[in-house]
Image (spheres, rainbow, N blue to C red):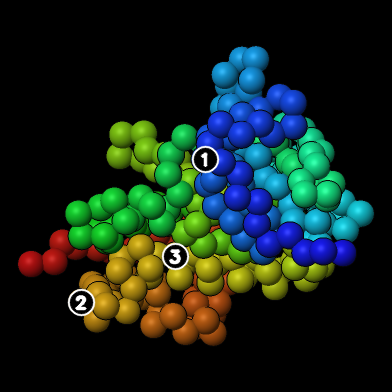
Amino acid sequence: MTRVNGFDLQHGQALASAYIVEERLGSGWEGEVYRVRERHTSIRRAVKLFFPQRNRNNTTLRRYATKLDRLRRCPMVIRYLHTETIEYEGHRVSCLVSELVEGPVLSRYVASLPRKRMEPFEALSLVHALSLGLEEIHLAGEYHGDLHDGNVFIEREGVFFRPKVFDFFHRGRKRTTYQREDIVDLVRLLYDALGGASTYKQQPDYIKSICRGLRNDLVRRQFPTATHLRHHLESFEWHLEA
């Protein structure tokens, strides 16, 4: 099979018979995600196009759609709508259509900030919202599998974050193991949102007590579940630095 490594769909291009492409939102190992507009209603949706070599016999798409459907009652998970099939340069390409979240992905949000990083309490507020969402996902017996700043959409409502996640990744049946890796990924997300290695030494102790120097073994030991991380964020003592 000839490999497809990118679709490079352009603004205004037709997608299937029902959609018009507006913008590429992101890409990953499995495929690319685009913002599209329904031709007849002008309603905007998100469409994930799967690389054929990553989706043999539609196995990847079925897993992804099934997971989204199973998690449809979790507010942090985007809503699955339906699937489409298109022709692309002689390939039949499967697409998954979902709700569109209007906010930017976290990487773009952080890049738009004056110092290109979040302030500690703001970042903790976001991580708390994400830990609540992960807790629901994990209690449903699932995991995300590839949490990073390119697949977390940011919406704000007053002082609250209402994040949404997409691009769930299937890593196998060791769900407890991959749930723990979700927590490690979330701590790394906090570390990066605060500026990464360039600012870590200057971070307050309550940040370092969570990030643990990015020692995965220490993070797993302190926060074996999303519930442990949420409880910590809701109960630790913090203060403004002088």
Q: How far apart are marks 3 and 2 (CA)?
A: 17 Å
Residue under pointer 2: 202
Residue under pointer 3: 189
Q: In this view, does 144 lie above or below 136?
A: below
The picture quadrant where one finds residue 77 is: top right
Q: Is residue 205 above or below residue 151?
A: below
Question: The C terminus appears in which quarter of the rendering?
Answer: bottom left
Q: Distance between the residues labelled 2 and 1?
A: 38 Å
Question: The N terminus appears in which quarter of the rendering?
Answer: bottom right
Which circle's residue, 1 or 3, is located before the other in the chain?
Answer: 1
Q: Is residue 57 above or below residue 103?
A: below
Residue under pointer 1: 23
Choose mark 1 or mark 3, whichever is in front: 1
Q: Which residue is drawn at 42% across and 53% down?
A: 106
Q: What element carries label 1?
A: strand
Q: Distance between the residues labelled 1 and 3?
A: 25 Å
Q: Which amino acid does label 2 sit on?
A: Gln
Asked if residue 57 lies left or right of residue 173, the reply is right
Q: Residues within 10 Å of mark 2 (few under 14, many from 20)?
A: few
